[in-house]
Amino acid sequence: MNGIPAADTLALAVFIFFFGVTIVAGSTVSHWKGLLPNGKKAAPTQHVDAEGGHGTEEWGLGGRQFGGWVTWFLVGGDFYTAYTVIAVPALVYAVGAYGFFALPYTIIVYPFIFVVMPKLWKIAHDGGHATAADMIRARFQSRPLELAVALSGLIAVMPYIALQLIGIRTVVEALGFSGEIPLIIAFVSLAAYTWLGGLHAPALTAFIKDVMIYIAVIAAVTLIPIKLGGYGHMFDVMNSVVALPDDKHVLPTGQIMPYATLALSSALAAFLYPHTLTGILAAKSADTVKQNAVYLPVYTIVLGLIALLGMMAHVAGIDTTVSTMVVPYLFLKLFPDWFAGFAFAAIAVGALVPAAVMAIGAANLLTHNILPKGYETVTASRVAAFGVKLGALLCVLFLNAKFAIDLQLLGGVIILQTFPALILGLTKYRFSSVGMLSGWVVGTVVGLGICWTDGLKPIHALAVGGHTQLISTGLIALVINIIVVGVVSAIVPNKTMAVAAE
C-alpha cells in the first residue's frame, strides 16, 4: 500500500520500555507504601478478606478515597481511551467531518455529570453501594431489575474493552508483529495489569498515560502540520479528498441527523457504563465529582486535536483500507522511530488504563449483583474481571464491525437501556419496577435486533413524517424504552418503593 512505512528496532525498544514500565508500576502498586491517598491506611471498617487482600472495596473502588487530582486523571483516563486515539481519527479518515460527532458528545456530557452524578455518589456513599445495580436494588426493591441492570453493564462493557484490545493490537502490529501475536500481547498485558493492581493500578498510571498522550498529541498537532505545509494547506487538500455539499457546510444533509443523534445518545450513555461510574463512586466526596465535571472538558480540546490526525493522514499520503492503522502509520512516516515508539506506548497505555477500569467495574457487577452471596472477595473479583476480558477477546474475534468505533457504539445501545432505571429513578415520580423492567426488555430487544439486522451499524434508517432519517439506534431504543416504562408504570404502579434521595 502507498505511503505505509515500517518500524525499526529502536521504535520497538522504546515501546517496550515505556509500556513495560507502566505495566510493572500498575501491577506492583499494592506493594507500595502510602498506597492510599495522603498515605492513609485502609479504614478499620473496610472488609479484608481471608487471603490477606485489602478487600473488594479497596480492590474495586480504591477505598472511595480518591481526591480531585486522582479522580480527574482516573475518570479522564477511563473516558478517553483507544476510542479517542485510534477509533475517532480512523472514522475521520474514512468519512470526514461526520467523525467529529465525538466532540459535541463530550461537551453535552459534562453538565449531565455536574447535575446527576453527585446525587448518585451520595446515594452510593450513604447506602454503601458499589455498582449501579446496587442502587437499583435499594431504590426499586426488585431483584429482577437489579439483574437486568447488572447484565446490561456487564455485556455493554465487553465490546468497549474489545476496542481497547484493538488499540493495543494496532500499535503492536505497526511495530512489525503479525498474526495473532499482537492480540495475545494485548490480552496478556491487560490481564496481568488488572489482576495484580486492582483500581489503584489505573488510578496511578492514568497520570502516566495522560502525560504520555499529551506529549504525543502536542508534538503531532504542532510538528505534523509544519511538515505538511500548514493547517490551511491541509484543509485545502481535505476539501479535494472529501467532497463538501456546498461552500457553507461540511456535512451533507443526510449526515446531520445521525451526527446529532449519535452525539446525544453517546452523551447519555457515557457515564452509565460500569467503568465510568466506578471512577465517580471512587471519589471521596460529591464536591470532588462536581469539580471534575468543571475541569474534565479540558480533555475535549485534546480530543478535537486527535481527531484531526485522521485528516493529516490523508494529506501525508497514508493509503490504507485498514482505518485503525491510520494513526500508527502517520507517526511512523513523519516522526523519528524513537518518538514513534514512544507515541505507540502512549496509545497502548491509553487503552490499558481504561480497559482495566472497565474490567473492574464489570467484575463489581458480577460479584455484587449477579453471583450468589459469598463471592464478594478479591479473588472472585479478579477471576470475574478475567472472565470479562475473555468475553471482550471473543468480541474482537467474532464481532465483524466495519469500524472499531462501532464496538463502543454497540455497547452504548445496550447500556442506554439502563438510563430510565438509574436516572429517571432519581426523580420524584414513582415509576414502578415492573414498568422499568418492561421498558428494559423491550428497549434491549429492539436495540439489539436493529443492530443485528443493520450489520452492527450504530444508526438506523427510520421513516419519520414521510421522510427517511438516519437516527442513532440507541436513541430509538431508549425512546421506546421510556414510553413502555411510562405506560406500564401507569397500569401497574409499585406497591412499595424506597424514597428517592433528594
Image (spheres, grey):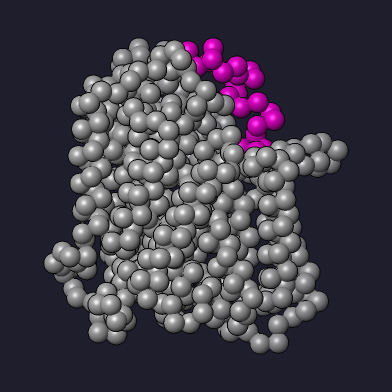
Judging depth in this view, the residue of 439 and 325 nearest the camera is 325
Judging depth in this view, the residue of 177 and 253 nearest the camera is 177
Q: In this view, does 449 lie to the left or right of 70?
A: right
Dividing the picture into quadrants, the one containing residue 248 is top right
Q: Can residue 406 be seen in this view?
A: yes
How far across and down, in percent of the image, does residue 466 sit? 86, 38
Per the image, is 418 magenta? no
How far across and down, in percent of the image, does residue 304 sit? 42, 35
Question: Compared with residue 398, is residue 304 higher up or lower down, i.e. above or below?
Answer: above
Q: Which residue lies furthest to the bottom in this view?
A: 496
Q: Is residue 190 left or right of residue 341?
A: right
Judging depth in this view, the residue of 485 and 187 nearest the camera is 187
**Which residue is painted at 28% across and 61% down in the image?**
197
**Which residue is painted at 31% across and 76% down in the image?**
55
Q: Residue furthest left?
A: 33
How far across and down, in percent of the image, does residue 118 sit? 44, 68
How far across and down, in percent of the image, does residue 362 sit? 47, 63
Per the image, is 244 magenta? yes
Dividing the picture into quadrants, the one containing residue 306 is top left
Magenta span:
235-259
Counting every numbered tag in the picture gives 0
**Which residue is painted at 55% across and 68% down in the image?**
150
Question: Compared with residue 357, is residue 107 higher up or lower down, i.e. above or below?
Answer: above
Question: Compared with residue 328, is residue 133 higher up or lower down, i.e. above or below?
Answer: below
Q: In this view, does 29 lie to the left or right of 280?
A: left
Q: Is residue 263 visible?
A: no
**Which residue is painted at 17% across and 65% down in the image?**
31
